[in-house]
Image: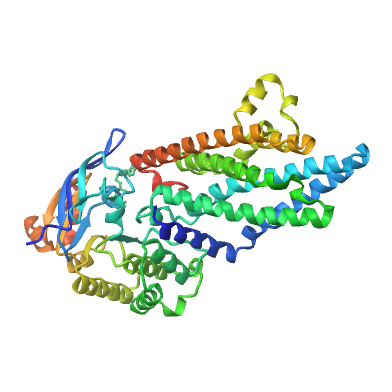
Amino acid sequence: MAYHRIAALVIRHLYLYRRSLPRVMEIIYWPFLDLVVWGFITVYLATFQGQMPAVVTFLLGALILWDVLFRSQQGITISFLEEIWARNLMNLFASPLTPSEFLAATMVMSLFKVTAVSMVMSVCAWIFYSYNVFIIGLWLMPFIINLVLTGWIIGVFTTSLIMRFGQEAEVLAWSMVFLFQPISCVFYPMEVLPAWLRGVAWINPAAHVFEGMRGLLATHAAPLTSLSLASGLNLLYLGAVIVWFHHTFNVCKERGSLVRVGE
Amino acid sequence: MSSPVVEVRNLNKRFGEFTAVDGISFDIERGEILGLLGPNGAGKTTTFQMMLGLVTPTSGSIRMFGLDLQTNREAILQQVNFSSTYISLPYSLTVEENLRVVARLYGMSNIAGRIDDMVKKLEMSEWRNKLTRKLSSGQMTRLTLAKALLTEPKVLFLDEPTASLDPDIAHKIRGILLEERQATGLSILYTSHNMREMEEMSDRIIFLQRGKIVAEGTAKDIVARFGQADLEEVFLKLAREQ
Ligand SMILES: Nc1ncnc2c1ncn2[C@@H]1O[C@H](COP(=O)(O)OP(=O)(O)OP(=O)(O)O)[C@@H](O)[C@H]1O
């Protein structure tokens, strides 16, 4: 790994964000809208139940955490798409840049996005709904780290598919993550799923994070089991998708399709 | 004599049943300009891409600076660059930002100084702060050439580097390339459909057809061997024999 090459790619993306309104909107405006809409829904639901704190905590917390996963995935996949759109893959991969360094740079971008979006959402939640994300306490950190990892897994997997199948697969950059949403049990506990789907959800690390969060808020017990399961699964899958990405990269070089992606 | 900078041996690329490059071998010496000629689909781009590590050969070997590309990709590509009329740099960055990113990618030192030199050399000062999106095709070609020379390569791959340039700029660019070769011992592998340019620039020419080398030598040799008036005639004769 050469850090100067990773830094070069990160700087390239930061130049891009510096003068692109749509890209900045992606970080500020959409998360803000998301939060406002869900905030009102939460407030509305709370008037029915008279249990304001619990509902707000569950829903807004879940929403913010889901966005962490979503932006983490986007940070990876969109960074790759940017290179396709800019027809820059040939410039990059004919340089000494390695696929691992490329992935590392997309991961750094992903961290930037997650940090920016989480800050925007947390501040808005606090201003508009007096909602303090840190109600979850210090456990928030390991939860977030695990969601970022799950986002990377989905992001690297999606990137491999786009690299392999080209333009037709581009839509996956936005849709893939929603395939995982129902089995991530973001807004409801795992036990509401039908038994067969519960098995599928169980092998999804994100589901354990959201289970852990709900458990923590309800019982204040340390969510150690959930976190261990999430971390174990995340590390396993992350290793696997990185191997898969390198494999796809080599297949594309064999087929001569690497520099033709998106054409 | 020192060993060649580039050694290609029995290079072969099949896409499924189709053979795009069929067992070609050649060397490039230090400071040599080798022209790669051939009709559309002859396998020039595929050869370039294999030499840049973007396409994996089916068989054969590519060695540069005495190292095998398969096993020493990073060390080799650090000393190699390319420019092509058909490739651009990211549109949403300015000319200078693009050059800065490339310089960092190759770990250059004294980046600002290098960029200033390059901008002066390729007469880019008027538009160095322009968005790349707003460049004319000729300016874009100069930018991709600047990015290639910026990293001080020892081997340069050029795919029709003057195709979209006006005759004045094209002439200047040829001058710069020859100068660079003189000053640094740069080796160049070159494609062009401009036969006069090929004759003027190349020390040696390889003629590819259907993935095979069908003629090799100086422009003069080749013209004489095929009994034609000039390289253009040779090209037409060979290409029409398909
Ligand atoms: N990835 C690929 N998959 C299948 N066939 C390919 C691939 N890349 C190139 N080819 C085929 O290989 C042959 C050689 O193509 P190549 O692009 O190397 O030719 P070229 O000499 O560069 O042509 P041109 O002058 O038109 O650029 C062509 O018939 C082309 O269709």
Q: Nearer the viewer, residue A76 or A114?
A: A114
- For this orientation, the residue located farthest to the top is A195
Residue drawn at point x = 25 percent, y = 75 percent:
B175
- Which residue occupies 45% across, 61% down? A8
Q: Quadrant of residue B148?
A: bottom left
Q: Position of residue B37 (x, y in %)?
A: 22, 56
Q: Is residue B159 shown to the viewer in this render?
A: no
In this rendering, the answer to whether A149 lies above or below B137 is above
**Which of B25/B166 is in front?**
B25
Whether residue B134 is visible: yes
Name the side, left or right, on which B22 lies relative to A130. left
Residue drawn 59% across the image and 43% down it: A151
Q: Position of residue A33 (x, y in %)?
A: 76, 52
Using residue B47 as the reference point, say whether residue A129 is left or right of it: right
Quadrant housing residue B105: bottom left
Q: Position of residue B30 (x, y in %)?
A: 16, 63
As drawn, B63 above or below A156 = below
Residue A40, compared with residue B134, is above or below; it is above
- Model colouring: rainbow
Looking at the image, residue A56 sits to the left or right of residue B220; the answer is right
| Position in image of residue B107 (x %, y %) | 37, 64
The residue drawn where x is 79% and y is 55% is: A126
Q: How many marks?
A: 0
Q: Nearer the viewer, residue A210 or B123?
A: A210
